[in-house]
Amino acid sequence: MSEVFDDRLCELGEGPLWHPGRGQLFWFDILGRRLLTRDAEGPRDWAFPEMVSAAGWVDDGALLVASETALFRFDLATGQRADLCALEADDTATRSNDGRADPQGGFWIGTMGKRGRDDPGAGSIWRWRRGELRRLYPGITISNAICFSPDGRTAHFADTATARVMRVALDADGWPKGEPELFLDLRVALLNPDGAVVDAEGLMWMAQWGAGRVAAYAPDGSLVRTVDFDAPHTSCPAFGGPDRTTLYVTTAREGMDEAARAASPQAGMTLMAGGVAKGQAEHRVAL
């Protein structure tokens, strides 16, 4: 049974991150240009002059944040930003979207056109590690489902516009080796792969835009179970809580008319379901 974790409405909630050192969930409202969290004192947020979408943790006081122009270190105490590198800063038509730190200390980030499906192939999948930013896969329309196997040997990513989830083997430093192969083809099921995370046992938990659920898939691609949420546009999951058995999911109101919003009042809130599975600890970004 799902519950409301935070009732602040996000037009496009995304990028939930459970910070293991702080015991705290962070997430984004991309279109609202803000980073949100809850701590012992209650809800808190930071506003930015551009869209922000994903993060990894650097230490107990800082996050690596992806925006539409850069990857930057963000100091949670002072709110100060220190840019690490530009990210498609010369292309005003794109923005960052889904991203996650890998077990080798790198950070994968996807970009996409600001018009979504109306900007086919405008985005890419990138990886940043120890000062180097490398474009891995161009021609992506809506980047999503960036996540990693517990042993660090496999990365996953998706282009929501194609309804296909790919996987690729990684070398010891976390760079791809060989070509990506198809992991899930969701076209026949008419499902839209969105953000995803792999749990400690190797199951991929994927938010599916428009389906109001997070679905778990085994490494062989078989569907294991689903968890339903009271919002149609589930966008990205994260495991957290003291024992990492709470499944959090961001949701969105984007594309919903007033009648749809009235029918789904939790749309745009950040939701949770307890005792679902045990997640991996989120990996630290090595600067």
Image: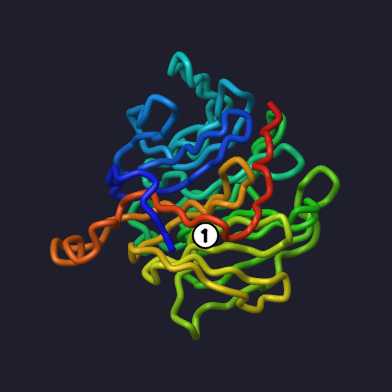
Report the residue that reaches farthest toward the left. Answer: 258
User: Please, is residue 182 above or below residue 12 in the view?
Assistant: below
Q: Residue at x 72, y 76 (%)?
A: 220
Residue 86: horizontal and vertical position, in percent? Answer: 53, 31
Report the residue that reaches farthest toward the top. Answer: 78
Question: Along the line of sight, which residue is nearer the eye, 86 or 96?
Answer: 96
Report the residue that reaches farthest toward the right. Answer: 172
Question: Along the line of sight, which residue is nearer the eye, 28 or 178?
Answer: 28
What kind of residue is marked 1? Ile
Q: Residue at x 50, y 72 (%)?
A: 163
Residue 235: horizontal and vertical position, in percent? Answer: 43, 57
Q: How many marks?
A: 1
Q: Residue at x 31, y 44 (%)?
A: 31
Residue 241: horizontal and vertical position, in percent? Answer: 56, 43
| Quarter of image, res 205 | bottom right
Display colour scheme: rainbow
Look at the numbered disc 1 and give the secondary structure of its residue: strand
Quadrant of the image for the C terminus? top right
Question: Along the line of sight, which residue is nearer the eye, 198 or 285?
Answer: 198
Quadrant of the image for the N terminus? bottom left
| Quarter of image, res 168 | bottom right
Question: Along the line of sight, which residue is nearer the eye, 37 or 152?
Answer: 37
Residue 21: horizontal and vertical position, in percent? Answer: 63, 29
| Quarter of image, res 184 | bottom right
User: Please, is residue 162 above or below residue 1 in the view?
Assistant: below
User: Dot 1: few (<14), some (14–19), or many (≥20) neighbours within 10 Å?
Assistant: many
Q: Residue at x 34, y 66 (%)?
A: 232
- Residue at which label 1 appears: 140
